[in-house]
Image: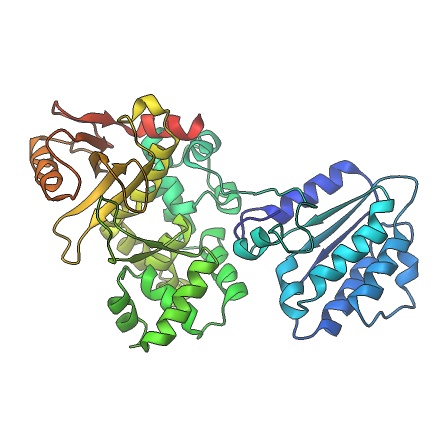
Amino acid sequence: MRGRRRVGKSRLVEEFVERASVPHLFFTASAQPTVAADLALFVEAARASSLPGAGLFTAQQPATWDAALTLLAAALPADRPAVVVLDEMPYLIATDPGFEGTLQKVFDREFSRRPVLLICVGSDLAMMEALNDYGRPFHQRATEMVVPPLNPADVAEMLDLPAPEAFDAHLVSGGLPLILDEWPPGASPTEYLADAVVDPTSALLVSAERALAAEFPPQSQANLVLRAIGSGERTFSLIARAAGDLPQASLTRALRLLTGKRIVEALIPLSTQPSRETRYVVAEPYLRFWLSFLGPYLPEIERGRGDLTLARITTSWTSWRGRAIEPAVREALRRLPADRLPEGTSAIGGFWTRTNNPEIDLVGADREPVGRRVTFVGSIKWLERRAFDGHDLGRLLLHRSLLPGADERTELVAVSRAGVDVDGVRALSAEDLLTAYRD
């Protein structure tokens, strides 16, 4: 089972185990410096578990994972089901690279003979995804489960919000259940932020801080690079400058780590011509919001001046939201039925040049990263009171003329929060996007 930090994986498994009402062991690993430290915590958890043979661990101090897991097998019941949960398994693999093979060996020799469900949970998406790869010990042995954040349609249903405000709430919360659980139903993002931003213990403030602390040391290069990207820098050179003039090799390593962990996305323009104009963005909506508005200002919030932070959000919200909504819109378009998009659309992205002339919100093509044919060119206007109008259409027509692979026959798409006031474009509203997520 894999999913981003704070998305609710452990809570989901805990709820499952509680409802199952069977003997179980729930062990949560942490970033211990040695295998011996991990084993000591495992023995402690096993001793306190509800397994019928938990007493076997009372006088035992296994020195290897082989010995500890073999002892665990002896503690399992043979006549009724049991559950064993290994939470944050990537920590165990990081401390002992042989753990994966050891677990597979004991599973085949011992666990498989007993009615036991083994659940391995992890927040390192890339590492957990790789566990089932060809050549790995658990290849084709495990059933994979992905726990995603709640999507905008889930947020709308949970908070009883109309489509436009549901998207705004998703940009703030990232669909994290811990944050949404403290969000009053029916409250607009403005109303929720007025309470959450001034509370230093709110899930909105502490979730990202805890997740980042679990991933990176505070002054690590990856942390510095992530905060530079979160502040709005998107190109290699500007990120290097914002992170303290990092050397090229150091920045490359940090970006490789961040993209490998799926915390940062590396985007390239979509058209019929190859491009090297890579841009980097924070992958999670909530983390984007936190890095932009909350993380840099935690000291002022903690000294009781959350009102300053809230004023800053209010001032910058509209401009920040206009760019932050783009990934959510593109994902919604990918989910639309084929008949709602121009024929032949298989890839959806954006387009830009080094000088941002043009910079196009939406581009559809028959494939990626380099298309054979551009199927549509689109614009996103996410303003409360101004619809997509003739001025916006003229700008979109100009952008179409500058896009490699597009011509006057290429369809135009307008996504607007406040509606579309012109003809000649395929119009999509916030309600249309929410329906795409719901379906």
Q: Position of residue 170 (x, y in %)?
A: 40, 41
Quarter of the image containing the C terminus?
top left
Look at 23% across and 51% down and name the residue there. 315
Q: Position of residue 49 (x, y in %)?
A: 82, 53
Look at 29% across and 77% down and name the residue there. 245
Q: Nearer the viewer, residue 429 or 371?
A: 371
Q: Is residue 85 left or right of residue 361?
A: right
Q: Is residue 186 left or right of residue 409?
A: right
Look at 28% across and 66% down and name the residue there. 236
Q: Position of residue 341 (x, y in %)?
A: 29, 27
The image's colouring method is: rainbow
Q: Nearer the viewer, residue 4 or 419?
A: 4
Quarter of the rendering containing residue 344 = top left
Quarter of the rendering containing residue 355 = bottom left
Give the number of callouts. Answer: 0
Q: Position of residue 333 (x, y in %)?
A: 33, 33
Asked if residue 393 is positioned above or below residue 289 in the image, the reply reads above
Asked if residue 254 is positioned above or below residue 116 in the image, the reply reads below
Residue 30 can be seen, yes or no:
no
Look at 82% across and 41% down and name the residue there. 22
Q: Is residue 210 left or right of residue 286?
A: right
Residue 256 can be seen, yes or no:
yes
Q: Nearer the viewer, residue 382 or 143?
A: 143
